[in-house]
Amino acid sequence: MKLPNIAVRIIAGAIFVGLLLGGILINEYTFAIIFSLITVLSLYEFYGLIEKDTKVPVIRVWNVLGGFFLFLGSFYFCVFDSSALAFVPYIIYVLILFISELYLKRTNPIQSIAYSLLGQFYIAIPYALTNYLVFAYEPGKYHYVYILALLVFIWVNDSFAYLSGMAFGKHRLFERISPKKSWEGFIGGAAVSIGSSLIFAHFFTNLPVWAWIGFAVVTIVFGTWGDLFESLIKRTLGVKDSGNMIPGHGGILDRFDSTILAIPAIFLYLILISNI
């Protein structure tokens, strides 16, 4: 018997969230497994869209491996050895990416390199920075709180922005890119997310209350921009979803679009407040 779409969506979503939270909460190695897999699948989707919808040839497998090398290098740098040697495989990837264009005889090698590097800057670097987040709470020790807080603030914001927008939405937030988003939804989601930051401030006192509130605000603002930017990519390419890896939910990028800009923003935020 075929399950209704809503049941498929709920089951797939529950499994996805369970795997993600399990990977984050257990230890640094399960975190690395989950987020390196997310890196690989996100890049695979992105470069697939580039090849299919822009008709620009890229070395898909090599670019995916490049992002994988960057994530593992960052993880090794944080856990075992704070040495530039951790990034040697990624440097080799970059060198081969450029040198290979001398031999592939493409009509527009600059375009192929540009799209390859776009995937690295847009996806691989933000995911690699998650390694900093999980070792920033206690230097040298793994702790899940910052990455968990970022995900919770985004999930809460998305959920209550949707509900607030459905109930009160009248003024479009960014109609050219995402016609359904409203300022009322944005404000409703932001208010509940900021409220949830007070719960983190109560249980995790390494940051003062104002810093946790700032953490939530930065996450919400840049998460919203991240969501809009992925919508811009999909609208430009003329696709509805980035993929179909998660039944009923679209692709991996569709589920992590908000985090992609929020992660580097929080990286900078934590560095800034640590020097205050």
Image (spheres, helix red, strand yellow):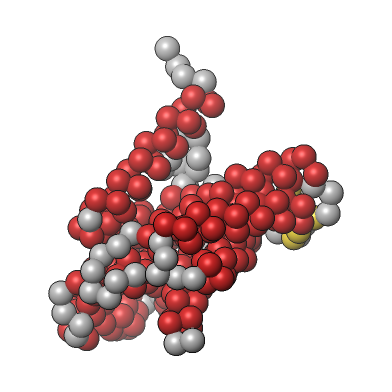
- Residue 29 image position (x, y, % from top left): 20, 58
Residue at image point 42% right, 65% down: 205
Q: Which quadrant holds residue 109?
A: bottom left
Q: Residue furthest right?
A: 170
Question: Residue 276 vs residue 60: left or right?
Answer: right
- Residue 54 image position (x, y, % from top left): 53, 62
- Residue 76 image position (x, y, % from top left): 20, 72
Residue at image point 23% right, 60% down: 28
Can residue 4 be seen at all in this image of the molecule? yes
Question: Residue 127 vs residue 115: left or right?
Answer: left
Can residue 153 be seen at all in this image of the molecule? no
Q: Which quadrant holds residue 174?
A: bottom right
Residue at image point 45% right, 76% down: 270
- Residue 136 image position (x, y, % from top left): 34, 73
Figure label count: 0
Q: Nearer the viewer, residue 245 or 173?
A: 173
Question: Residue 154 vs residue 131: left or right?
Answer: right
Residue at image point 19% right, 85% down: 83
- Would you place residue 250 above or below residue 215 in this image? above
Q: Nearer the viewer, residue 20 or 111?
A: 20
Quadrant where the N terminus is found in the figure: top left
Q: Residue furthest top?
A: 1
Question: Residue 174 vs residue 68: left or right?
Answer: right
Q: Nearer the viewer, residue 69 or 118?
A: 69
Q: Nearer the viewer, residue 2 or 49?
A: 2
